[in-house]
Image (cartoon, rainbow, N blue to C red):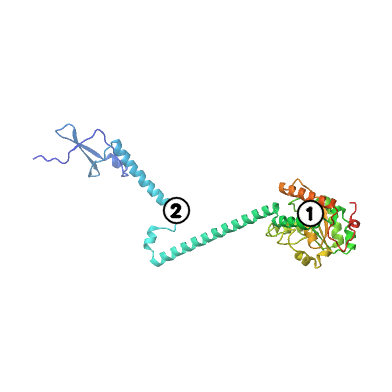
Amino acid sequence: MTSTIAAAHVPSCWYIHNHLNVPHHAQKKRKLTTLSLADADSQILIRNINGLSLPQTHSCSKGKESNNRARYNSHSNQNHKHTSFRQYFPLIDTKDTNNQNPKTRNNDQHQVDEDEQREFKANKEARVLFTNMWWVDMKAAFGQRINLPGILTSTMVILKDPKLALPHISVPDIRYIDWAELHRKGFKGVVFDKDNTITAPYSLTPWPPLESSLERCKLEFGPDIAVFSNSAGLYEYDHDGLKARMLEGAIGIKVIRHRVKKPAGTAEEIEKHFGCESSQLIMVGDRPFTDIVYGNRNGFLTILTEPLSLSEEPFIVKQVRKLETSFVTYWSRRGLKPPDQKLLPDPRTCVKDP
């Protein structure tokens, strides 16, 4: 009786997918045996590799070849992703985690949770700080252009007491002021506005032509000189005091820190700084409705100077300045006078040629 080992219909092509790394000399020992059957279209292929008979079952059709390659690539990608995941997250080790004591795993997880909470808290604090700084800076920039307390005070001055906007002395700049004469009259200190009075707008260095006059003022009044400004030294604008310190270093004059913008507020901070009443002090500034109104409301001798530079002022400030000047000119022509100053009945004696 004849026995048949194996029979199969042989396709027209075979794809050999070599998963085994067989040495070259072993490949030479391979024997390919073909058994022919009665049917010429049917053959049996038996592959003998080192005495082992492996029936070939891989079809080399293009569809199966594509599927095998897809499976191999998918398997490789998964291995690559796992390797990358292990690389970037070395704390997560599957094998070590399975062998860890449950208490150790819980401690590690608790430590990770604490680190995440600290990081979240730090990020939250940074966002809050950035928001606060952004709001402070925006508020300061807006406040430099729109002085709401000043608008309210100015409205009251226009309607009820316009003489508060009239200065005792008007000069082109501080070089026309006789500091020695003012000192002889009994005044004990001088308070300067900053922008467009002794510096250009938003500058932290003195206007060069005025440096000699500032030095003469220091010779007469010594340390009893200060800057009281709606920019440097104002908490709303200079919240960390940096601009005040920079200005002090540049001009050698103390900058008084304060919270309320001129013309609103009292002279309490200034009187505390100088140790005398405001009626013994001189207020020098370039704005009638801020510096002069503030000085007259609190009893200072007021000196109005012309602005040093209009080119660097914001547009809205220029328009307000024009309006203020027109009001002061109109009231002066009508014969209005500033409030009396007991130490200086005749201010003209303190004006000189530069």
**Residue 226 visible, this orientation:** no
Secondary structure of residue under mark 1: helix
Marks 1 and 2, the one that precedes in the sequence: 2
Mark 1 lies on residue:
288
Q: Nearer the viewer, mark 1 or mark 2?
A: 1
Locate residue 246: give its quadrant: bottom right
Instruction: Tell me the residue at 44%/66% (across/down).
Output: 107
Lateral position of residue 255 relative to residue 85, left or right? right
Q: Residues within 10 Å of mark 2 (few under 14, many from 20)?
A: few
Q: Is 59 or 328 nearer to us in this picture?
A: 328
> Left or right: 63 with respect to 147?
left
Q: Position of residue 321 (x, y in %)?
A: 76, 49
Residue at image position (85%, 58%) is: 217
Q: Indicate the amino acid at tag 1.
A: Pro
Q: Residue 245 in the image: state x and y as whole percent.
A: 73, 59
Q: Residue at x 70, y 51 (%)?
A: 145
Q: How far apart, in angstroms, are the residues tagged by discs 1 and 2? A: 71 Å
Position of residue 100 measured from the top left corner of the image (x, y, whole percent): 39, 64
In the rendered image, residue 192, in percent from the top left (x then y), is placed at: 80, 57
Q: Which mark is residue 28?
A: none
Identity, as a three-letter code, of the amino acid under mark 2: Gln
Image height check: is 274 above or below 329?
Answer: below
Q: Residue furthest right?
A: 349
Residue 62 in which image quadrant: top left
* Residue under pointer 2: 87
